[in-house]
Amino acid sequence: MADIPTFTLNNGVAMPGVLFGCFQGPECRETADIEGLHDALAAGYRGLDTANNYNTEAAVGEGVRKTDIPREQLFITTKLPSTMHHDVKASFEDSLKQLGTYIDLYLMHWPQGKKEDGTVYDGPPDGPTFNDVWEEMEKLLETKQVRAIGVSNFSHKTLGQLLQTAKVTPAVCQVEGHPFHPDFAFMKFCHSKGIHMSYYSPLGNGQTVLKDADLVEIGDAHGVSAGQVCLAWALANGVSVNPRSTNAERIKGNITLPKLTDAEVKRINDIHKNDEKRHSRLCLQPYNKEDNTASGWSLEKLGWDVGFKHA
């Protein structure tokens, strides 16, 4: 089995290659415990990925306080919600309070802002632009309560716009990624700017990718699941992953990964090229099928060149 790598971000901060996803489903369960968190820490996870929108920050904080693992050995990611683009400082301070500890990585969850009435906006008069939001996030580094800042759900288009005014280059860009949507062109762009790419939904939608014949065959050759192959493939491409599960066996499996051959990595790299039906976004959580938008913006505005063909 392969060792799980640690990636060094552009400011020298070390980030685990596999983080435990702390999203508990669309209901965003409010609880003093996150199902599977104890199992994840016991299995060797040292990265935890949460967000204000998940309503699990307090549960992550509670889990961290209950463990015997020293805080400095853990890596906690959380995110600024679209509804708080107008007050980054207050949202950040609320996350600190919920977690009860400092934050290793703070991400802008989406480029678009959202008003209290649900209206999504892109700058004045409704709210700040994401460039303005990033300027406020840069100031958070002065608090010494966050070690790195980055973005999520950005694209070549929106990240390029952000970099035109950014004084601090994002350390991480977290996007949907899996063999059906590796986003290699954007990955190359990020790497050229010194930005680490991280995949959420690295197993796709939990069904389509995990039943893929190529991935199953490669998994069988190593005596592992297609899901473990997906995660090992991402790491081989220099991308960290944020899988989530509540099943103890799968939680352990997601951090017990095979060492893929170069030929196997290339075979998986080519899946989306060789079959047009296997080139699709699969994470439907933010997607509105009726108007083909994601979190209120059109895919064109988001700069997403691959849509939801399996929606």
Image (tube, rainbow, N blue to C red):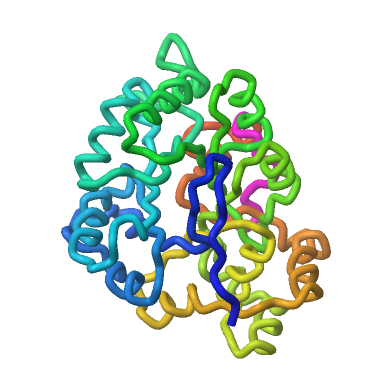
**Where does the magenta region start and end?**
301-311
Quadrant location of residue 280?
bottom right
Of residue 152 and residue 240, the one placed in the foreground of this image is 240
Quadrant location of residue 214?
bottom right
Horizontal side of residue 109 vs 276, given as left or right = left
- Quadrant where the N terminus lies? bottom right
Residue that sits furthest to the top in the current view: 125
User: Is residue 76 in view?
Assistant: yes
Q: Residue at x 27, y 71 (%)?
A: 38
**Up/down of 287 relative to 161, above or below:** below
Of residue 111 and residue 97, the one placed in the foreground of this image is 97
Residue 235 placement (x, y as % from top left):
62, 64
Horizontal side of residue 204 vs 119, given as left or right = right
Q: Residue at x 40, y 83 (%)?
A: 249
Q: Residue at x 32, y 75 (%)?
A: 42
- Count of numbered marks: 0
For the stretch drawn in magenta, what is the main secondary structure?
A: loop
Of residue 174 and residue 115, the one placed in the foreground of this image is 174
Residue 211 placement (x, y as % from top left):
61, 77
**Up/down of 271 relative to 124, above or below:** below
Residue 23 placement (x, y as % from top left):
36, 56
Quadrant location of residue 119?
top left
Does 309 appear in magenta?
yes
- Quadrant where the C terminus lies? bottom right
Q: Residue at x 25, y 46 (%)?
A: 101
**Up/down of 149 relative to 100, above or below:** above
Horizontal side of residue 60 vs 302, given as left or right = left
User: Is residue 120 in view?
Assistant: no
Residue 231 placement (x, y as % from top left):
58, 68
Does 224 appear in magenta?
no
